[in-house]
Image (cartoon, rainbow, N blue to C red):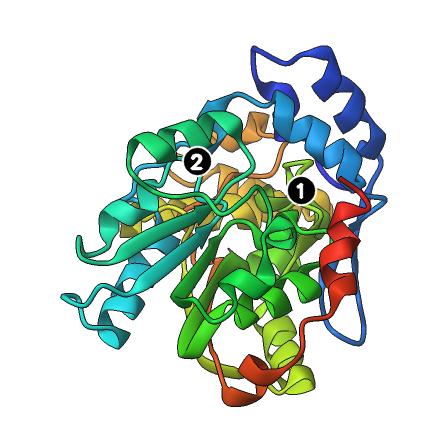
Amino acid sequence: MCGAPVELTKDDVNQVILDVVGKIRSSHLLRCDECHLLYRWPQLNESDLARLYGNLPDSYWSYDAFKMGSWQSASKVLRSVFDVSSPINVLDVGAFDGSFFSTLPAPWKKHAIEPSPIAVQRLAKAGIPCLGPYVEAIDMQRHRGQFDAITLFDVFEHLPHPDSTIRLLLKLLRPGGRLLVSTGNGDHWTWRMLRSHHWYLHSAQHVCVGSESYFRRWADRTGTTIDAIVKHPHQITGFGGRMKQSIETVHAWARLSNRRRLRGLIQRLPSFSYLIHKSGAPFTTGLHDHVLVVFRQTDAIAEAPINPSEQREHAAHS
């Protein structure tokens, strides 16, 4: 059974959040044997997700650009592929206030997809145009082949239909363009230990989790090219912090699997006696339990027709 939703731990929880999150308090983490996608079941439908997003405070998506493992990894990849002085077009999906763009060269032209009205106002003040609230809601014919690079950070796990969303994003790229997707890595050892108790699943908004094996299988099935897969942490953390989080994870696994001797041994380690009173899974944001997948646009994808049902799929639930 999945852990208690983090949305309920805030001081400003309103009744809408309580009602929506309450629907999945007994959800479980499952895995598709065919594609290896991890997914929550039952999970919130798109209507409930929209209600949840509309009632969460802005602070949920405020990050330090230079501590985000995904942003720093993506910036390095993009700078190695594209000329930093050329005015290429970059689209960030789920951009919030556009903080990621501060890691990119000034000449690059920035664009966003963002559902939050408050965030859209901040983007406008920064001179960053917003194409729409969701990928499926934008004019695909108008924007097809417009972008050199598209980024998707901590958004994949929010998608009710991740396969179709990735397909649409690839069609927005120019031939040779790059799609960078960063999300949790269900193949990481912490997931194998903690499963549904993993910290990344403690948000009710997270309906699925990718993995290195999922993305490779998806690419093979669809004929998509993967240039690179970069493993990274959610938050950049020093060696000492990573060691501490690793030990906390093993302790949580020992508690969940009733390994009393191992749990007692860890609790007797210097500086770890506090784990005696620890009942929940640790938030190990410093471990390399995320992947950044770099997809490359090919002629076959660029010329593939747009399936109208992929765009209607989201609209029917909005």
Instruction: Locate residue 94, reporting x and y percent.
Output: 50, 45
Q: Give the label on residue 255, or none.
A: 1
Callout 1: 10 Å neighbours few (<14), some, many (20+)? some
CA separation, marks 2 and 1? 14 Å
Task: Give the residue type that dot 1 points to.
Answer: Arg
Q: Which residue is found at the position 80% from the left and 43% from the top?
A: 317
Dot 2: within a 10 Å radius of its alpha carbon, few (fewer than 14), some, or many (20 or more) residues? some
Q: Is residue 154 visible?
A: yes
Question: Above or below — where is 213 with respect to 84?
Answer: below
Drawn side of residue 299 relative to residue 222, left or right: left
Q: Is residue 17 above or below residue 310?
A: above
Residue at left 36%, top 59%? 90
Tag 1 secondary structure? helix
Disc number placed over residue 272 in the picture, else none: 2
Residue 39 seen in the current view: no
Q: Which amino acid does the dot numbered 2 rest on?
A: Phe
